[in-house]
Image (tube, rainbow, N blue to C red):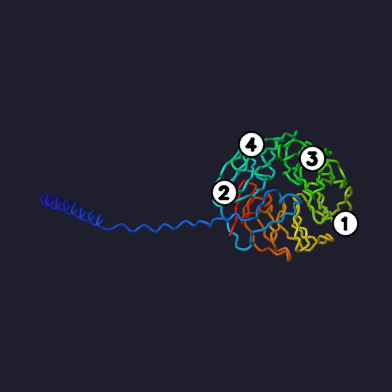
Amino acid sequence: MKIFSRIIVPVLFIAAAAGAFLFMRHLHSVPEPAAPPVPEKSVPAPISPGSSQWTAYQGGGAMTGVASGIDSVGLKLRWTINIGNNAESSAAILDGTAYIGGKDSKFRAIDIDTGEIKWQKTLDASIAATPLILDNKIFIGDTSGILHVLSVSDGAELGRFETIDEIHSSINYSGGRIFFGSWDNFLYCLDPGDYHLLWKFQTDAQVHATPTTDGKHVFIGGCDHHLRSVSLASGKEDASIDFDDIVPTPPMVVKNSVIVGTMNGVVARYAVGESSLEQIWRRSFPGERFYAGFAYSETHSAILASGQDKALYCLELDTGKTVWAFSSLQGFDAPPVVCGSSVFAAGKDGRLHVIDIKSGAEIFSFLAGPPIKGAPAIGNSVIIFCDSSGNLYCLSH
């Protein structure tokens, strides 16, 4: 038995070693499987800047929120970047670049084609307003009360104007003048060439909302419960209406009249005279608040009004009668934008809703997730908007 073990064990060992050797040779001789093909990266077609720009809050001037150059059908996400938590600003768009500020105090210029940051400038405090682009300059206020003037090309600071308190108002313009409100209770009017003060008008409370204009008057809603008409030339008050309620909405000018909303759910239209504001109609919406603002469809002779708690309302311009109401889960903190026969409305439900103006039916929606506070900006064949977590989205075809 010992002799058998002495013979068989070495034999088995040699056989096992030989088998292992042959097995390893077989493994090395088997060719490796071909690597799966790498899918080609999908790159959106380059954007052509075109003539459609968006250089001020709600289009500037009368702030009717009317845009052009984009079809509501077939929109897709082009890119997204983050610009800092709690964002509530909206973008300006010019020649293939989007300009926007964030709560992180950074002001950014972003390439619309790629989403890459061309340049960024750190300001003195957080930014809640929308920039105005005028004569290759950017005018933007921050919450330290400073109006900054930056170069469009590289963000270099060209000048500044200091107020006493926070600036949440966007900058508007007309007749070679720029104007904006501050929490120091003043409406300011400056020369855009050298940024010197032309006049300032004192109200009885913070001027939070962006002022609008018909070219002769500047209209402001106020925390002092008033809608005021102020002469663009002199800075003197021409007329005022006491609503006995906060008037937070940026007014909108349409056909020699001004539209305004209140926190207690009132929307009203006033005819504008040289030194008067005469009521045309006044509507009350119980349980609703109007904070964000308006847009106008001339084709449908309709006002689009964002309700902060319930719905987006389509109202007849002549009568104020409700044509339709589009309900959203949490209402709207941003003003709508009209483009052709569609209205783009950014919701607190985290969706960008695209609605047919005639029927009130939803055509398309894009889910961002967090609430959207900033107004959508439409220009250069894209739509750009930001959610409250700071994600900036660019949609295109």
Mark 2 = which residue? 111
Q: Amino acid at mark 3?
A: Leu
- The image shows residue 22 at horizontal and vertical percentages of 20, 55
Q: Is residue 159 left or right of residue 272?
A: left
Residue 157: numbered disc: 4
- The image shows residue 308 at horizontal and vertical percentages of 75, 52
Q: Amino acid at mark 1?
A: Ile
- Secondary-structure class at tag 1: strand
Q: Is residue 23 above or below residue 140?
A: below
Mark nearer the viewer, 3 or 4 = 4
Q: CA distance from mark 3 to mark 4?
A: 23 Å
Q: CA distance from mark 3 to mark 2?
A: 33 Å
Q: Amino acid at mark 2?
A: Asp
Q: Amino acid at mark 4?
A: Glu
Mark 1 = which residue? 280
Corner quadrant of residue 196 = top right
- The image shows residue 270 at horizontal and vertical percentages of 86, 53
Of the residues under marks 1 and 4, which one precedes in the sequence? 4
Q: Is residue 293 above or below residue 160?
A: below
Q: CA distance from mark 1 to mark 4?
A: 45 Å
Give the number of callouts. 4
Q: CA distance from mark 2 to mark 4?
A: 20 Å
Answer few, some or many: residues within 10 Å of disc 3's Cα (few below 14, many 20 plus, some between 14 and 19). many
Mark 3 = which residue? 187
Q: CA distance from mark 2 to mark 1?
A: 45 Å
Q: CA distance from mark 1 to mark 3?
A: 26 Å
Q: Quadrant of the C terminus?
A: bottom right
